[in-house]
Image (cartoon, rainbow, N blue to C red):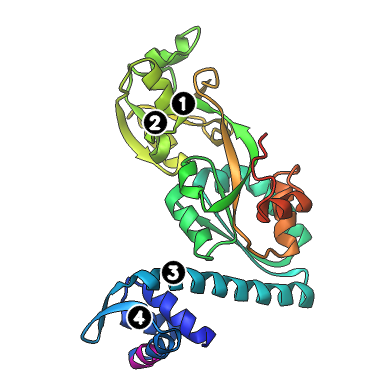
Amino acid sequence: MKLQQLRYVCEVARRGLNLSGAAEALHTSQPGISKQIRLLEEEIGVKVFVRHGKRFIGVTEPGRTILAIAGRVLKDVENLRQVGLEYASEDSGALIIATTHTQARYALPPVIQRFTQRYPKVRLSLREGSPQQIAQLVLSGEADIAIATEAPDLYQDLVMLPCYQWNRCVITPLNHPLLRLPKLTIDAIARYPIITYDFALSADSPIKRAFEARGIQPSVVLTAIDADVIKAYVELGLGVGILAKMAFDPARDLGLRLIDASHLFEPSTTRIGIRRNAYMRGYAFDFIELFAPHLNRKMVETALRGEGTNYEL
């Protein structure tokens, strides 16, 4: 049995059983992949894939178990490589962060500035996306760390550690009627079209729960994952915005006004997500601690071992 064979079966499965796509990704030929998978199946005594002629059309029952084990083996092999890199060059390498636009634009800049000053040889990359995309990037190994808030069900296969809590504001154009109210209410917001995040209407969203508690179905005219997009359309007069309070910058957002809404919505917790049993370079632990000072290396390592994962702020 060879690691190459395990890579082949995992890549074929990841490519939706597309042999040509797997061959291209692995820089080899389709016949070569087919031959190595057949040799692996002969060695372990069961078929991994269901075939129709030369085509793979499905995964067998034992094949699903084999793919899961193969995936773990390949991740452990990558961890071994990372151990070697750690000791060969402790202050250089790469770190990929998967996160939302709001975190990348408003929460991370000072952290990244300090990190790059401390580790100038580390290549830092940000991958922005929806909660679903963020989770998948880390689970697949394409990113090292997830930073996200909403949709906790998407992150059940990751170790999630709480970083900080935040709440929301309502933004309006200049001279909007909401600005003249003595106190903002859910009923008052509901009188106007709403622009907010894509995930704001998911089942576990504090925004959705707040409107449901009042028996109100809000008129949401536009959703986006980008806070700057939300602000742009509010400034055009399309509606009022509900977004993270950190995403409003009075020095830049001169055509908008902010109304605090923390009394209307439950606070949300931003968390860092890490693939279970992942090997992390020393500078990755430092990045986490820069972002959330209470998450020191010992605490993160304990959580990755499956201990103390219920820690809350």
Vertical position of residue 248 compared to residue 258: above or below: below
Say what secondary structure mark 4 lies in.
loop
Q: Which of marks 1 and 3 is nearer the N terminus?
A: 3
- Residue 291, disc: none
Determine contact: label 4, label 1, CB under 8 Å: no
> In the image, what residue type sits under mark 4?
Lys
Determine contact: label 3, label 2, CB under 8 Å: no
> In the image, what residue type sits under mark 1?
Ile
Which residue in the structure is indicated by mark 2? 234
Let me know if residue 252 is in the magenta part: no
Which residue in the structure is indicated by mark 3? 65
Vertical position of residue 132 compared to residue 42: above or below: above
| Residue 103, quarter of the rendered image | top right
Give the camera-side residue of 270 and 304.
304
Q: Give the range drawn in magenta.
A: 31-35
Say what secondary structure mark 2 lies in.
helix
Which residue in the structure is indicated by mark 1? 171
